[in-house]
Amino acid sequence: MAMEDLNLDAYWMPFTAKRYFEAHPERRILARAEGAYYWTEDGHKLYDGLSGLWCCGLGHRHPKIVDAVKKQLDTLDYGTAFQMGHAPAFTLAERIADMAPDGFSKVFFCNSGSEAVDTALKISLAYHRIRGDAARTRLIGREKGYHGVGFAGISVGGMVANRKMYSSSMLAGVDHLPHTHKLEKMAFSRGEPDWGAHLADELIRLVQLHDASTIAAVIVEPMQGSAGVIVPPKGYLKRLRELCTQYGILLIFDEVICGFGRMGAPFAAQHYDVKPDLITFAKGVNNGMVPMGGVIVTDEIYKAFMTGPEHAVEFFHGYTYSGHPLAVAAAHATLDILEEEDIYARANDLSQVLEEAVHGLKGEPNVIDIRNCRLAAAVEFAPIEGRPGYRALRVFEEGLKRGVLFRFTGDIIAMGPPMISTPDEITRMADVLADAIRAAG
Ligand SMILES: Cc1ncc(COP(=O)(O)O)c(C=O)c1O
């Protein structure tokens, strides 16, 4: 369809400045994609600098995933998920549990990261109650955390723009750990910053305020992706683990971005060698081809639920599309590719290239921080006075003109390139970013 004939009016777009989009749609309507690239309706080729929205790490339309989904359509399109199942969903759960650290053995499926977070928080609350620890109802998130857009996710999340309209309707009994994004202490760190592990001890303050017996769970993203790649300080996650264990609090790693390769390992839990009690996932589980999310839990958590009459439902929770056959088929193919194409090693190799390339941007105009975390990186800019967020938007636009799609959030450009990229593509992305920064002024 010709761009001029497209009416942009009716579609209320997610997390989009719609009026600006309508005024500046050039290079922003995607027509097709393949591998690490998109092509736009107006004929431009764009390198996909964020792997979709952190979900297409194996590249777009990977032929093995496409084939798996097509094949699935010839057998079972949809199968009711309540009191019935289909074989590939069981084998997928087993495969995902096997990829997780030791002790994780059960997987609950849903359709998005937001639903995964809802599910993990409900499992945590129910777990304590079933065990007779019903006073443990408090949930603790972290400032700048992003856990999706459900009421639970925005409650434990820490992004003011996502929260302020709904302040009276959020979950009660939620506290937040401080964020670890302190540029005075950590700007231009390569990988994990040296400063900040002590911020995990803020959990002790919350325990002293509320008493551990009232706290059900702490939820954190190991690497805070949506806030602009905020990298955990050295030792921070380990300290959080120690404290949660000490106080009987469940630790949830929200691995919606980290899971399935971006950290050069199946999960951040392995990369950081820190074992949470629950892991949420989505996005990369099936390379973004069909919406899917889920929660992985330890045997101990699952077993706590297995009480009561055998014929009775143990966990009153689920979604019409839990374990949707198309999503499951795409996930099986994705896990095959992760193994067969040695993707973790490729992500690890590329992350060295990414680190070198992005830190080379130090000294470019208005750059106040550069950070990287395995195959994720961000460049932060000094905001233009009175126009927060506009500088990064301008860099984004200049990036589009030069053939790279970056993600901007606040005054930060985030990058999470496809794991199937070549080193040259990563270096070129950084070169384009340098040009875009200069052009944006
Ligand atoms: C850590 C984390 N949790 C949850 C979500 C929400 O996922 P979804 O948009 O699929 O609901 C996201 C999305 O980016 C995320 O990064």
Image: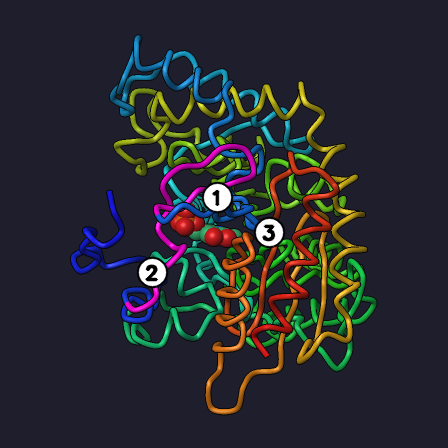
- Residue 102 percent coordinates (x, y): 69, 30
Q: Is residue 85 left or right of residue 351?
A: left
Q: Residue at x 59, y 73 (%)?
A: 439
Q: Which residues are magenta?
A: 23-41
Mark number, residue 25: 2
Q: How is the image coloured?
A: rainbow
- Residue 424 percent coordinates (x, y): 73, 43
**Could you say whether the residue bearing mark 1 is in a helix, strand or loop?**
loop
**Could you say whether the residue bearing mark 3 is in a helix, strand or loop?**
strand
Q: Quadrant of the N terminus?
A: top left
Amino acid found under the numbered disc labelled 3: Leu
Q: CA distance from mark 3 to mark 2?
A: 42 Å
Amino acid found under the numbered disc labelled 1: Arg
**Vertical side of 77 occupied by 368: above or below:** below
**Label whose residue precedes the other's in the sequence (1 or 3):** 1
- Residue 187 percent coordinates (x, y): 75, 74
Q: Quadrant of the C terminus?
A: bottom right
Q: CA distance from mark 1 to mark 2?
A: 54 Å
* Residue beneath disc 1: 131
Q: How many marks?
A: 3
**Label whose residue precedes the other's in the sequence (1 or 2):** 2
Amino acid found under the numbered disc labelled 2: Pro
Q: Residue at x 69, y 79 (%)?
A: 365
**Vertical side of 268 occupied by 399: above or below:** below
**Which residue in the rendered view is the most extreme toward the top?**
75
Mark 2, residues whose alpha carbon is within 10 Å: few (<14), some, or many (≥20)?
few
Mark 1, residues whose alpha carbon is within 10 Å: few (<14), some, or many (≥20)?
few
Residue situated in front as seen by the camera: 24 or 406? 24
* Residue beneath disc 3: 251
Q: Residue at x 54, y 71 (%)?
A: 143
